[in-house]
Amino acid sequence: MAVVGPREPCPCGSGRRYKACHGGRSRPAPVLRPFVGRRDEPDLVALRELVPSATAPLQLSAAHLEAHPEHAGRRIILGTMLPQAAPALVRDDGEILIAIQTAVPGLDASRDIAGALLAALDATPGSVIDTPAASSPLLVNQQAGGLAALPGLVDVLDPAPLEITVWDGFGWWLPSTDGAEGDALNQEAAALLERANATVVPTVRLGGVAAAYWCHPGDRWHLRWSLPLAAPGGTDAGSPSDSDTDAGTDTDADAVPVAASEEALLDALARLAAADQLTVGPGSRFVGFFRANGLVVPVWDLAAGTEASACEQPAVELLTAYRAALAERVPLDAAQRRIRAGLVGRSLTLR
């Protein structure tokens, strides 16, 4: 949290004065970028805020396995949400399911997920982990080292990016069982699954660019793209280096360039909008952006009936234009500044 005066707006974005919000000693400040330090930070933000049903296998870090060799070989799946919004559960066969979306989050989602994972690793098969969030204010205040003493995802997981699978329902909640036992389990879970599946908005992760998700809520079609930002200070493990943030030196044509700051990112969007390049296909319309977990997520309205496949090539072309706009060093002109001010004025921040 930035140091501000007691009568200034609180950096958390609540709109209240700092002294009436997080300026008091009894109110620990939430972590605005919980997944910073992970190369897949944009996808983690999307799984927490945008995607209704998705999974990704997890691998424990080498350092954790060296300290806890008994955890080697455990099968761990990260999912968007679990039954009853539980933080984690352990199947009868020892497989662990970890949720990135929970009912009562703490101050740091990364430490909450890591805490649930560590609890599940030591739990007996058939257990449901329903303990409070590891970074809940009450527990943090009781922790000798505070929030910094709690392990996060960068500490317990292998740094390789997640391999994400988006589902059209929550069938992955059920274990892989066959025969009469599996039939009985399916009958017991049918009502729960039916209710959960009814809430799922059709969602597809694009294949040509990272962390871009097509969705079809009701009679609307959208594309939402979680864009990466450099880590503050560049000191977090696994965060992009200074050379990675320079779009002009990016050697991977498919990689989304990492903006050095939110200011640079918004400048690039303004340049693209002024040049009528901020589009993801015929009939699409850029409607603005919101902030989620510290990242900027632009949103487009798509023409009625637009399928995810129709966004693939336009998204790749936009990626090329975005890379060039991010590398531009000329100050914004008057028209671009007006567009940028309009974008910022219409932005939202998810809390």
Image (cartoon, helix red, strand yellow):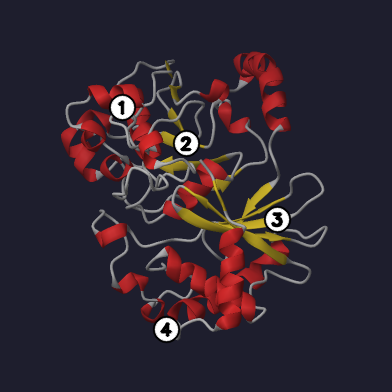
Q: Is tag 2's residue or tag 1's residue first in the polypeptide sequence? A: 1
- Quick one: 244 or 286, which is closer to the camera? 286
Marks 4 and 1, the one that precedes in the sequence: 1
Callout 2 secondary element: loop
Whether residue 15 is visible to the viewer of this picture, yes or no, is yes
Q: Residue 329 carries which label?
A: 4
* Residue most extreme to the bottom: 330
Could you tell which of marks 1 and 3 lies nearer the N-terminus? 1
Q: Where is residue 294 in the image (x, y as percent from the top left)?
A: 44, 51
Horizontal arrangement in the rendering, residue 7 relative to residue 202 (left or right)? left
Q: Eyeballing the image, is 229 above or below 271? A: above
Mark 3 and mark 4 lie on one chain; the one further toward the N terminus is 3
- Which circle, 2 or 1, is nearer the viewer? 1
**Residue identifier under label 3:** 222
SS class, disc 3:
strand
Judge depth for marks 1 and 3 and give the one in front.
1
- The residue drawn where x is 69% and y is 31% is 197
Q: How far apart are marks 4 and 1 (CA)?
A: 44 Å
Label 2 with label 3: CB-CB less than 8 Å:
no
Marking on residue 26: 1
Q: What residue type is labelled 4?
A: Arg
Residue placed under numbered mark 2 in the picture: 100
Q: Which of 182 and 4 is in front in this view?
A: 4
**Residue 131 rendering spot, x and y as whole percentages:** 39, 18
